[in-house]
Amino acid sequence: MRLRTLLGDHACTSALKGGSIKSDLVTLDFAEYSPTNKGFKPMVREAAFDVSEMAIVTYLMAKSFGKPMVLLPHVVLARFQHAHAVYRAELGNLKPRDLEGRRVGIRSFTTTTGAWLRGILANDYGVDLNSIHWVTFEDAHVAEFRDTTVRAPQGKAIIQMLLDGELDAVLGEKVTRWCRSIIWWWSAKRCPTSSRKRCGKFFGCCKRARRWRRHPLYRDLTPKKCAARWN
């Protein structure tokens, strides 16, 4: 049996993609997408692959709309998301609640990183998400989702808009020399000095890292329902 497969290049997939792990029953035909998330939309909308790496929020949304996909108990990626909420350093030392009333950009409102960060901002820091002016650059992977955000002008790049002052902060992007991570900048001040170095690599509050004791799920493995039933 041959399965058209979408998998990124990760430590947990290298043996499979490199051929050192093989099956006498199944052959995986790997599709090349760079970055890998560019393949999520055709998987959800067109069932373009038999097996696909998939962002967890995209899968949950697809499942809610009855897409014929199955979630396997195999985590492809997991990470703390705190470093991916950044703002322009020239704004000074912003606290998470200072985002209220400001313009915050995000590639697509339904990205898994964005969902995690909105939850952290709301639940851990009391941020009123409805007060933020959300600006997006792409539609959702799941076509049925109704996007009520403001769409950025055609041709605009999210980081450049941030640096140009057209956005105050962005979710889902990495820190550059001109930006700061708003959650880490604020949380670090609330952590014991002796613990900062140990927890700093997560760009999150030490208290939160100790409470979770695990990395937040980011991407999992999802075959089409018909492929999952094959035996």
Image (cartoon, grey):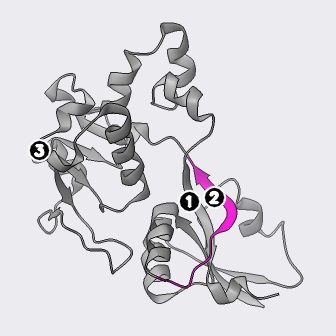
For label 2, the SS is strand
Question: Visible in this render: residue 173?
Answer: no
Q: Any magenta on residue 155?
A: no
Above or below residue 199? Residue 41 is below
Magenta residues span: 66-78
Which of pointers 1 and 2 lies earlier in the amino acid sequence? 2
Q: Nearer the viewer, residue 38 or 169?
A: 169
Task: Measure the C-alpha gap from mark 1 to mark 2.
Answer: 5 Å
Q: Name which residue lies at 12% across and 42% down.
A: 102
Q: Position of residue 23 (x, y in %)?
A: 86, 77
Which of pointers 2 and 3 lies earlier in the amino acid sequence? 2
Q: Position of residue 117 (x, y in %)?
A: 37, 45
Q: Is residue 173 left or right of residue 13?
A: left
Q: Is residue 97 left or right of residue 16?
A: left
User: Residue 219: which numbered mark, if any?
Assistant: 1
CB contact under 8 Å: marks 2 and 3: no
Task: Measure the C-alpha gap from mark 3 to mark 1.
Answer: 32 Å
For label 2, count other residues whose C-alpha is less than 10 Å away and answer few (under 14), some (14-19) or many (20+).
many
CB contact under 8 Å: marks 1 and 2: yes
Q: Nearer the viewer, residue 188 or 165?
A: 188
Q: Which residue is mark 2?
A: 76
**Amino acid, disc 3:** Asp
Above or below residue 129? Residue 206 is above
Mark 3 vs mark 1: give the one in front.
1
Above or below residue 17? Residue 44 is below
For label 3, count other residues whose C-alpha is less than 10 Å away and answer few (under 14), some (14-19) or many (20+).
few
Q: Which residue is mark 3?
A: 164
Q: Position of residue 7 (x, y in %)?
A: 61, 69
Determine the image quadrant of residue 79. Answer: top right
**In the image, farthest residue toward the right:** 24
